[in-house]
Amino acid sequence: MKIGIALSGGGIRGIAHAGVLHALEKNGIQVDIIGGTSAGSMIASLYAMGYSPEEIYTLFRKNARKIIGANTLPIISGIQSFLGRKDKTMGGFHNGKGIEEIYNVMAKQKGIETIDQIKMPLVIPSVDIMESKEYVFTNYIPEKPEDESQYITDITIGKAVRASSSFPAVFNPCHIKSHAFMDGGTLDNVPVNEVRKQGADKVLAVKFDSDPIDQNSNIMDIVMKTIDIMGSKIAEENLEQSDYILNVCTDKVGLLDTAKLDKCFDYGYEAVIKNLDEIKQILK
C-alpha cells in the first residue's frame, strides 16, 4: 500500500510539516508520495529529494530570512504604503529569487536540477493568474490526465517552489515563458487530489487551524486569517478525498514570523503524536 501526504500552505508555519514528517518516520509510517502547496511545497520538495525532516528544519533555520527577504515589520509597513500608492502594478515587495536560488543549491547538493530527476512522486501546484488556471509541477504525469498541458516536468526545483510560493503582495509573480505564476493556494491549498492521482492508496492531508482575530491583531494577522478562510473553503472538496485530515494548531504564528520556527516544528510533531493511534488505524 502506498501512503501519500498533502501539505498545505501557511507561510512560516510550513516548517510544522517537517515536524509532522519527523513524527511519522519515528513511528514507522513511510510516506511514498508527497505534494505541497506554497510553504508546503518547500517541505515536500526537500523531502522528495531525500532530505530528512531534521535536515529540513536545519535548512529552514539557516535560510529563513533569505527566503522571506525581510522580517514581519517591514512587510507590514510595506503593505500599508502599497495600499496608499496610486501607481499599483502587478508586483510585490520581493522578487522571490532568494527562494529559487536556495532551492536550486539544495537540489544540486543531491545531484538534482529539474523536478523530473526526483525519484519520489512529487506534486507542486501553482496558479497562472493570467489564465486563472492551475498548473502542477511534477516528476510523474498521471495516466490519462484530462489536461496533460496542466503538468510541467521540465522545470528547476527552485523555480517550481518559487512559483508555488509567490504569496500575493509579498512576492512578485514568477514569470516562466508566457506564464505568471502566483501562490498555489489560490486554487489548491491542500493538493490531495493530485497526490491521489500519483497512485496513493491512502492520503493524509495536513492543514493549519485558523487563529482568532482580536483588537490586537495587525494587518498581517488579518491577511493570514483571510487566507486561512479562503484556503479552507477552496480546499473543502479536496479534503473530502483524503483519508485523514491532520489539523495543526500553531497558536498565532504570523505569515513571516521566523522567531517561532522552533515552536512550529514542535506543533507539527505533537499533532501527529496526539492523533497517532487514529492515524495508524486509518493508514494501515
Image (cartoon, rainbow, N blue to C red):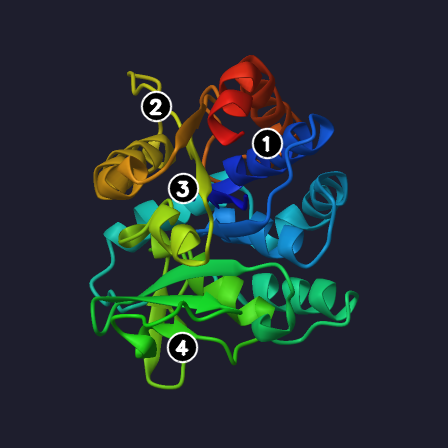
User: Label 3 to label 1, Cα distance in Å?
Assistant: 30 Å
Task: Specify the label residue 217 is tagged with.
Answer: 2
Residue type at the position of mark 4:
His
What crowding class fits label 4: few (fewer than 14 Cα within 10 Å), some (14-19), or many (20 or more)?
few
What crowding class fits label 1: few (fewer than 14 Cα within 10 Å), some (14-19), or many (20 or more)?
many
Question: Dots 2 and 3: beta carbons under 8 Å?
Answer: no
Question: Dots 3 and 1: beta carbons under 8 Å?
Answer: no
Comparing labels 4 and 3, the label whose residue is closer to the camera: 4
Q: Which residue is disc 1 drawn over?
A: 20
Q: Quadrant of residue 213?
A: top left
Q: Quadrant of residue 271?
A: top right
Residue type at the position of mark 2:
Ser
Q: Which residue is disc 3 drawn over?
A: 76
Look at 53% across and 50% down and name the residue there: 34
Look at 20% across and 67% down and name the residue there: 132
Q: Is residue 249 above or below residue 17?
A: above
User: Label 4 to label 1, Cα distance in Å?
Assistant: 32 Å
- Label 4 element class: strand
- Label 1 element class: helix
Look at 53% across and 71% down and name the residue there: 159
- Label 3 element class: helix
Residue 234 position within the rendered picture, expressed as x and y whole percent measured from the top left: 23, 43
